[in-house]
Structures are given as structure tokens and as C-alpha cells.
Image (cartoon, rainbow, N blue to C red):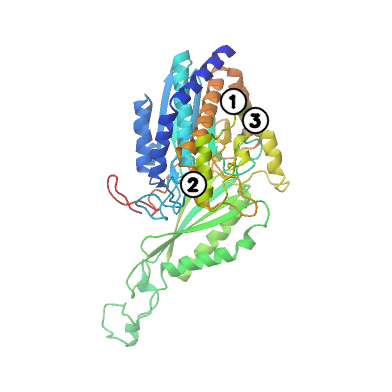
């Protein structure tokens, strides 16, 4: 195919996005307002499934046994595998404790408390941006007779690294010839660029459940010593000794593991450790031991070896804590992700397209929103309120250089994101487009978190992200569909890297997503909901 065809197809795709921008921002607002937490994104997923079917995609609803996941395909031309299959995806999970209205002052969304979920990154924009790119590519393929298959997956629970490892183990990425992974910018210097050498690292997340199902076997009852009627068949009076119970085990696990942080890994290399207590079943009568308690630990490390060392400490602590509380221990993996694979060929193709599109630009309406937000915080409105880097490109190589300045020489990977699992199935590029962020005021410190959350939900400020990312995805896909030498180079590099460093999956092929655990949820019916 000629370069003229490629250029014409890209122009068609970009025009489609411009013409549908009002609809795209309306779609985004809908997903942003739903703001459903991990594994409970039922309405968001349903919206994507219905829309994609209307657009002519064949959609598997609830793919890989995950009710809030999906897998959608659309093909143009022969279905014999001779044309490329290109993959990208949507995310749509929100984060508890971050409810914020799409306004210029701090306020939870109407009818919800501030503890309800909200889109922080925002994944709402991630999904609508890639959707824009896929639909624009589809339109251009139809208009210009370009053959190929577009594979679009719905990936729930990204904040838990939840679905991509499961989709990967079930073979959903096996036929992809290339994958494009997008995320709105969230840290410098990764703003309006693609990752080069330093990919995200390993991420492990595990739930330890302590269950006190046999409290009567803790020790002999006081009834056996004649304190009560020795013939009583009931061993649990108010004055009887009781098993410590599940909450005791949980607290022992929590305090021991937190106390041992300094002994887990060296204080270098950018690793992190977090925890969450899952609430189900701790409340009970005052004369009975707590039956069940759950704690989730999640940790990010530059490599698998470091992650395994933390795992060994936690597993030992869990065994000891369960014995102290007279509990049985249940273990449940949430995620176990490998570090990502680099693909320079894919990064070059994508960044070429990002350069052709240009960085986001914030117009008068967006500036007015940002200035009003500054006023609400008691600040003098700035003439240029947005962070300068949000309207600038940075090459992958320059971003890599700046990133490495703050890392130990031995460290290969930095922070974590679950796109890494996808990079083990096909050539992948990870890219970032700026989300709206305000320029800090000297001497005032950082803005409160609600500011970025709100800017991510206001149409005037989030639209530039959707436009730039959508056009970049479409341009990259059309290059890969019409220029076979680009895809061949990406595949050759992928094969070389896999051969040089094999890295098998860390969970068994039959691993199932932990959808049954008591994750935070909404309650209510139809459009009525409470947190």
C-alpha cells in the first residue's frame, strides 16, 4: 500500500474524531458520573457492550468469567488471518474515597458522600479515548478499503491489576499482532510521550483471610471445672474463655507485617507496600469470637525477585497470626504481574503519530474553568493556569533520560501498571497524553487531590486528552495496518526479547478473578444508589 493511502486514512480518522467530539465528551461524562469501583463496574461495562454491538462489533459479554469484562471484535476484509489483528482496551473502574463533582469547588457528586468512588486517573478518559481511536480507525478502514481486525477489550479492576492477567491466561491476547496501551498522564516526565526502556515493574496483591470456625476447641470450657453446671452442653457462656478470633489474627498480621517493612527489602529501588482491610463478618455478639477477617496486601517492586522476598515474609506472618487467633488461613491471589517488555519499534511508530497530532491545547473555556478553580481556593487566577508540560511533547528518549536521573543504576523498572502483562503476548507500546493539571503557585504547595479529579470530569478540560489520544491510537493502528514493514520490525524485536529473557506467567492457567471477595460496592436499584 502507498503512503498516500496511509495519509488519507489518517486524515479520515482524525476528521471523524473532530466531528464526533461532542458525542465523545458526552459519553465520557456518562462513564465519569457512574464511577463504579473495581469488579463492580456493571453499568459501565453494560454501556460499552451495548454501544459496541450497535457499532457492528461481535462482543463477548463477561469474558474470561469476569462479569464486568468484555471482548469485542470487528473485521474488514478476509477473516482468514492474513490481515493484522490490532488490540487496545478500555478501563472504567473508579477509586473509593474520591467522590468529586464536575465543578470548580470541592464537593462530592450529588446524592453521594465523599467516601464514594470517583475517577482519579481518570479511567473514564482512558476508555473513551481508546474507543474514539478504535471507532475512527474502523471508519477509515471502511472508507479506504483497509483490511484487518480490531480487538477491543474491557478491562475491569485496573487499580487491582485485576483483569489483564486473567484475559492473558485465557488466551484473549494470543492472536494480537500488536497492542497499544494508553493512560492519561499521571507523573512527570511521562507526559505526552511513550515509554522507552524503563517499563513498569512487578505487582503482587494477595488477600489473607482468617476464619475462626471452631472456637469451641480453643481450650477446655469453664463448665468442665464446675464453675457452671458441669452437665451443660453449651460451652460458651459470658464468663467462659473464648478463642481470640479472626480480628486478633488480622491485627497480628497487620502489625507484624508493618513492623517488618524495613527488613523486607533495602530502602532503595522505588518499591512500595500498601494494605486494605476488607469488611465482611467482623460484627458479632459480644460473647462470641469474630468469625472472619480479611486483609489485602499489595506491593510494587522493580523485579520479580524482590516481590517474592516480600511474599515469603507475608506468608510466614500469616501462618503465625492464624495460629495466634485460633483461626484457619485462606489465601487468595488478586494479581501477580510480571515486569513489562520494551518494544522500541512500536514506541517509534506511536510517537511519530503523536507528533503528527500535537500535544493537547487548552482553549478559552478550559482556561476559564481552571481560573475559577483557583479563585475557589483563594488564589489569584493565572493567565496560563495549566501545567506547562501538559501542552508540550517530550520524546521517548528524553523522557527516559529524565526518568533515569532519579533511579539507581541497577533498577530496570519503575512503578507498576497492569499493561505489563499484555506486553508478554505481543509487541506493545505504552503511551501517555496529558490530562488537565494546574501549574503550582509558588509557596502554596501542591493542589488538593479533588482539583485534578474535578478537571478530569469537566468536558472543556478533558476533551483535549480524548482528542489527542484518540487520534494517536487511530494513526498508529492505520500505520500498522497499511505498512507491513512496521509490524514486521515490531514482531522481530518482540521475538528477540522473549528469547533473550523468557518470563513465564506467575499464576496458573486456570486462575480465576477474585470477584467473590467483599469489594466496595454501591447499593440500590435502577438509577438510585447509595454508597
Residue at x 51%, y 25% (from the top left corner): 474
At label 3, counting other C-alpha atoms closer than 10 Å, the crowd grade (few under 14, some 14-19, many 20 or more) is many
Dot 2 falls on a residue whose secondary structure is helix
Residue at x 54%, y 23% (from the top left corner): 475
Q: Nearer the viewer, mark 1 or mark 2?
A: 2
Where residue 417 appears, as percent x and y from the top left, is 55, 43
- Residues under numbered marks 3 and 1 in contact, where contact means CB atoms less than 8 Å apart: no
Is 42 located above or below residue 329 in the figure? above
Q: Which residue is mark 1?
A: 353
Q: Which residue is mark 2?
A: 453
Q: Nearer the viewer, mark 2 or mark 3?
A: 2
Dot 1 falls on a residue whose secondary structure is helix
Q: Nearer the viewer, mark 3 or mark 1?
A: 1
Q: State the separation of the CA atoms marked 3 and 1.
A: 14 Å
The mark found on residue 56 in the picture is none
Where residue 408 appears, as percent x and y from the top left, is 72, 48
Q: Which residue is mark 3?
A: 344
At label 1, counting other C-alpha atoms closer than 10 Å, the crowd grade (few under 14, some 14-19, many 20 or more) is many
Q: State the separation of the CA atoms marked 1 and 2.
A: 28 Å
Asked whether the viewer can see residue 245, the reply is yes
Dot 3 falls on a residue whose secondary structure is helix
At label 2, counting other C-alpha atoms closer than 10 Å, the crowd grade (few under 14, some 14-19, many 20 or more) is many
Q: Earlier in the sequence, mark 2 or mark 3?
A: 3
Quadrant that contains the C terminus = bottom left
Quadrant that contains the N terminus = top right
- Left or right of 304: which side holds 93? left
Residue at x 53%, y 34% (from the top left corner): 363
Q: Earlier in the sequence, mark 1 or mark 2?
A: 1
Residue 444 versus residue 77: which sits nearer the camera?
Answer: 444
Q: Earlier in the sequence, mark 3 or mark 1?
A: 3
Amino acid at each position: 500500500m502507498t503512503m498516500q493511502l496511509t495519509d488519507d486514512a489518517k486524515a479520515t480518522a482524525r476528521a471523524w474524531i473532530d466531528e464526533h467530539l461532542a458525542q465523545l465528551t458526552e459519553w465520557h461524562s456518562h462513564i465519569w458520573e457512574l464511577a463504579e469501583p473495581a469488579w463492580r463496574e456493571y453499568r459501565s461495562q453494560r454501556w460499552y457492550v451495548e454501544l459496541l454491538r450497535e457499532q457492528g462489533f461481535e462482543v463477548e459479554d463477561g469474558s474470561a468469567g469476569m462479569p464486568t469484562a468484555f471482548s469485542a471484535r470487528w473485521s474488514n476484509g478476509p477473516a482468514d488471518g492474513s490481515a493484522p489483528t490490532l488490540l487496545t482496551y478500555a478501563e472504567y473502574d473508579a477509586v473509593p474515597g474520591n467522590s468529586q463533582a464536575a465543578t470548580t469547588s470541592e464537593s462530592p457528586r450529588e446524592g453521594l458522600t465523599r467516601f464514594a468512588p470517583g475517577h482519579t486517573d481518570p479511567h473514564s478518559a482512558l476508555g473513551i479515548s481508546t474507543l474514539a481511536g478504535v471507532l475512527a480507525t474502523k471508519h477509515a478502514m471502511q472508507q479506504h478499503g483497509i483490511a484487518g481486525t480490531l480487538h477491543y477489550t474491557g478491562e475491569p479492576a485496573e487499580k487491582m491489576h485485576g483483569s489483564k492477567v486473567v484475559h492473558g491466561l485465557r488466551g484473549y491476547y494470543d492472536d494480537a499482532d500488536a497492542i497499544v496501551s494508553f493512560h492519561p498522564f499521571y507523573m512527570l516526565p511521562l507526559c505526552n510521550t511513550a515509554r522507552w526502556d524503563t517499563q513498569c515493574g512487578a505487582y503482587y496483591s494477595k488477600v489473607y483471610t482468617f476464619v475462626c470456625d471452631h472456637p469451641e476447641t480453643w481450650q477446655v470450657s469453664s463448665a468442665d471445672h464446675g464453675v457452671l453446671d458441669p452437665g451443660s452442653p453449651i460451652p460458651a457462656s459470658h464468663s467462659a474463655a473464648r478463642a481470640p478470633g479472626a480480628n486478633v489474627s488480622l491485627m497480628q498480621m497487620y502489625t507484624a507485617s508493618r513492623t517488618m517493612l524495613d527488613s523486607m527489602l533495602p530502602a532503595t529501588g522505588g518499591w512500595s507496600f500498601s494494605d486494605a482491610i476488607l469488611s465482611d463478618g467482623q460484627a458479632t455478639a459480644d460473647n462470641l469470637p469474630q468469625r472472619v477477617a480479611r486483609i489485602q496486601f499489595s506491593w510494587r517492586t522493580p523485579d520479580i525477585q524482590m516481590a517474592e522476598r516480600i511474599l515469603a515474609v507475608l506468608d510466614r506472618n500469616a501462618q503465625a497470626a492464624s495460629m495466634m487467633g485460633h483461626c484457619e488461613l485462606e489465601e487468595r491471589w488478586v494479581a501477580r504481574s510480571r515486569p513489562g517488555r520494551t518494544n522500541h519499534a512500536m514506541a517509534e511508530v506511536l510517537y511519530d503519530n503523536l507528533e503528527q497530532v500535537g500535544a493537547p491545547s487548552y482553549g478559552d473555556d478550559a482556561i476559564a474553568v481552571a481560573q475559577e478553580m483557583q479563585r475557589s481556593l483563594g488564589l489569584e487566577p493565572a493567565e496560563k493556569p495549566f501545567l506547562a508540560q501538559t501542552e508540550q511533547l517530550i520524546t521517548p528518549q528524553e523522557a527516559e533520560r529524565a526518568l533515569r536521573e532519579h533511579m539507581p543504576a541497577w533498577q530496570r523498572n519503575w512503578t507498576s501498571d497492569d499493561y505489563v502483562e499484555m506486553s508478554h503476548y505481543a509487541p506493545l507500546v505504552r503511551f501517555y497524553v496529558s490530562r488537565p493539571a494546574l501549574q503550582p503557585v509558588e509557596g502554596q504547595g501542591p493542589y488538593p487531590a479533588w482539583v485534578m479529579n474535578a478537571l478530569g470530569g469537566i468536558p472543556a478540560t478533558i476533551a483535549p486528552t480524548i482528542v489527542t489520544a484518540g487520534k494517536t491510537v487511530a494513526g498508529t493502528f492505520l500505520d500498522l495496518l497499511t505498512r507491513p514493514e512496521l509490524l514486521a520490525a515490531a514482531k522481530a524485536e518482540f521475538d528477540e526479547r522473549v528469547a533473550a529473557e523468557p518470563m513465564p506467567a506467575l499464576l496458573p492457567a486456570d486462575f480465576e478473578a477474585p470477584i467473590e471477595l467483599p469489594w466496595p460496592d454501591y447499593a440500590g436499584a435502577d438509577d438510585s444508589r447509595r454508597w
